[in-house]
Amino acid sequence: MDDIKEQNISSNIDKLDGRTSEKKEKIVSDENTKSDLDHQELVKLTKEAIDNLIESDPFLCGLPSNVTVEEIKAQIAVAQGQAITLFLYRGELPKLSIVVPTHTTTVLDLKRAIKRHTNLCFKRDNIKKKISWRHVWKKYNLCFDNVQLLNDNENLKTYGITNKAELHYVKKYREKNKLRNIIKNA
């Protein structure tokens, strides 16, 4: 009989333990939900504060609402004279404004900046398109003032590129019988 009472008591204790653990789990999940909501509210408030700061600042006012840290740093560098803004015209597509440092920027650095900016624009517009940059640079050259930027290791200053310069793509033309021309000239 004592065994039966002990079993009943232990089963009741197990039931109580099960109920309390369920209640504890519910309380913990409720607290997590509250903290998640609080976190979401904080993120929303932070984004609004950043948007207000960007809109009110005269140097940053042209940036989009979902601006990256890199873009903010680039605009500050332009304002301090440590970087220049270049505009790339792409035919029917809207022009790209690209910010690069002034002193040691090469043509290759410019090409990388164009790639970063283009990919960022695609991401903002939710365009899932992959560009083969190897193909782009194989078929097109960048051009400034009717001068093609042919040497990737050349500094932009050697081409006379300054702030707010306008660049565009120029299709490369293949030289026929290039090997024959080299042999003839030798």
Image (tube, rainbow, N blue to C red):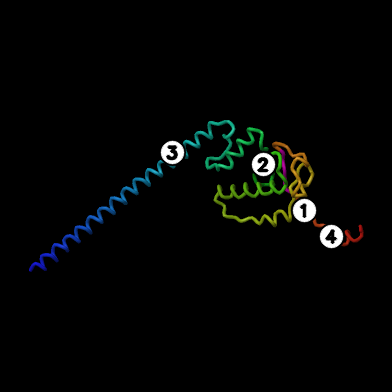
Question: Which marked residue is nearer to the observer: mark 2 or mark 3?
Answer: 2
Apparent side of residue 24 relative to residue 181 in the rendered image (left or right) = left
Mark 3 crowdedness (10 Å alpha carbons): few <14, some 14-19, many ≥20? few
* Residue at the disc numbered 1: 172
Question: Which marked residue is nearer to the observer: mark 3 or mark 1?
Answer: 3
What type is the residue that disc 4 sits on?
Answer: Lys
Q: Earlier in the sequence, mark 3 or mark 1?
A: 3
Main SS category, magenta section = strand
Mark 2 crowdedness (10 Å alpha carbons): few <14, some 14-19, many ≥20? many
Q: Is residue 44 above or below residue 138?
A: above
What type is the residue that disc 3 sits on?
Answer: Leu
Question: Which marked residue is nearer to the observer: mark 4 or mark 3?
Answer: 3
* Residue at the disc numbered 3: 45
Apparent side of residue 92 relative to residue 7 in the rendered image (left or right) = right
Point out residue 3 in the picture as x, y percentages from the top left corner.
11, 68
* Span highlighted in magenta in the image: 165-169
Name the mark on residue 100: 2
Point out residue 15 in the picture as x, y percentages from the top left corner.
19, 60
* Residue at the disc numbered 4: 176
